Amino acid sequence: MKKHILTGVMTLFCAITATSTPQMYVDEKVSDGIKTHIYDISAVDSVVHQTVDSIPQVKVMMNRYSPDIYPAKNLEQIYFTPDDKKIDTKLASYSKCKGGTTVENSNGISPHHNDTIATYKYDRENKTLHIRLISLTGECCGDGWIINATTQDSTIVLIPIQTGERGCNCICSYDVKVDLTNMVPRLYNFMVRNDKFSIDLSESTEGIILDIPRGYYNRSSDCKYVDDGFSDIYPREDAFPPISPTAPNQDTDIDMTKESHALVKYIFEPENGTAFIVSVNRMFNCCSTKGSKVRVSGDTVFVNSYETTMGEEMCDCECPYDISTSIENLKPKKYIFIVDGTEFKIDLENDTVLNNTIYDFERGLFVKNSPCKNVVGDEEELREEPTPTTPEHIEGSDTLVSYQFDPMAGTGLIVSHSRTLNCCSKKGSKTTIDASNITITTTQSGDVWCQCDCMFDITTKVMGLHLNKKYTFNVDGTKFDIEFDGDAPVSGVVTK
């Protein structure tokens, strides 16, 4: 969607309420402080205090999905919308043009900031939040800025609008400062153009907001069954949680054998830049408090589940739980996700299957291709018709395939050597598995093809391999057998 600069006389709504709907706040004590859970009151049926197995609990009953249950000892307080004072929003200042870029059509204004979206500083005494929006784009000939504000659900939407005449053939980046008053020390969600971020004023009074994916723990399922450490296991047939956090599970014919092998379930919504990820069957103590943490390193997103006991003793039983995590601020690009050790790739620009379950079965994942080893043909001249998507074997190359396996981890790296591929194509691999037969085929695709070919090495990672099992691999037509009869690393090459 294109963003346009609005000019002329604007009607300003510079006072917004703290929330568009009444809300209930649950402050939970966690290992590193207080975590605030926010509920729209319209979605809450009741709050029930109960005792289960001599453990006092507080259950938040909701009319759209399963209840949230908190051990009473972990709760700090439950309260409602703190006050009905309006949050006053005022433009504080704005910078001069930080750098102009000539464009053919200045109607399409896109952000070009670096990793920093905003900085903030909170004045507790005056209940004022000072936000500096970094590198907002606008036209070079703009003569100022105004800030409009509104709310969407529980999110404060700040709308920076540049004033002045349109028609410049260049765009600039600006820093815009805005002051928000009547801000109480709690969690706030913000949206500025296409950026979403949260500021928890109960935890910090100043900070930097970075343009990276951000995640937060959503909830855990009920215990699926109780293992008391002896021989008695009490199954809970209705304990499989829905993949959606707000919808009941409509699948009444769950394949329990297949479900027991599930590792991760996920739903991605590229248009919203969000994801809902469930780590399945995590074994935790029955009495512990569950949670998850998200860490981002480059294009890799790590999601790790954990449990805490808040100083209390563990119970003499363990349960499998499904731990759900929400991710925000995803961009239309490729990401690698590692969820409690389970790795998968998502291309939010090109993938069509964005609702999936990963099982603890053998599977393959394209990792990388090597740089071009040589060039045959003209790199600059384009080819009208693409080359075949499955390359042929290379004549004159001795090494066909190399491999390295870690039997204990159930993983391996397989390299198909010296594949002749188009210089400009997008390289990849496809893995298909039939029982113990694993076929890996090098692929190439793309809209632009050059009038030249190169030799590339294509690396594929296989996962979910099992000890004491023999596998037959077929890598671009090269067949070999691997049998994991020990836990020592296995490596080798296949030559002609």
Image (cartoon, rainbow, N blue to C red):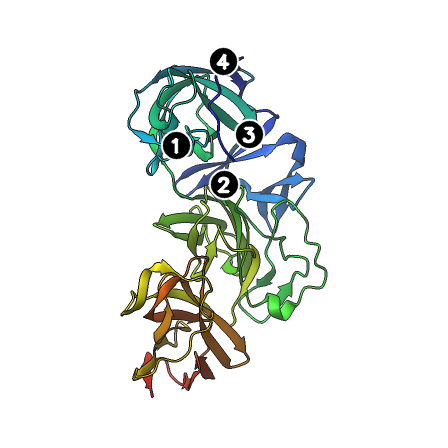
Q: Are marks 3 and 4 in contact (CB under 8 Å)?
A: no
Report the mark closest to the observer, 2 or 4: 4
Q: CA gap, disc 2 to disc 4? A: 54 Å
Q: Nearer the viewer, mark 3 or mark 1?
A: 3
Amino acid type at circle 2 is: Asn
Distance from label 2 to label 3 (Cα)?
25 Å
| Above/below status of 486 relative to 413 | below
User: Residue at 56% of width from left, 24% of height from top?
Assistant: 81
Picture coordinates of residue 240, whole percent (x, y):
63, 57
Q: Residue at x 50, y 54 (%)?
A: 350
- Tag on residue 203? 1
Residue kind at label 1, given as amino acid type:
Glu
Q: Is residue 15 above or below residue 381?
A: above
Q: Nearer the viewer, mark 2 or mark 3?
A: 3
| Quarter of the view holding residue 46 | top right
Query: Which of pointers 2 and 4 lies earlier in the amino acid sequence?
Result: 4
Label drawn at residue 154: 3
Reading the chain from its start, which is encountered first: label 1 or label 2?
A: 2
Q: Image check: 69 left or right of 388?
A: right
Write the residue at 38% across / 39% down. Answer: 211
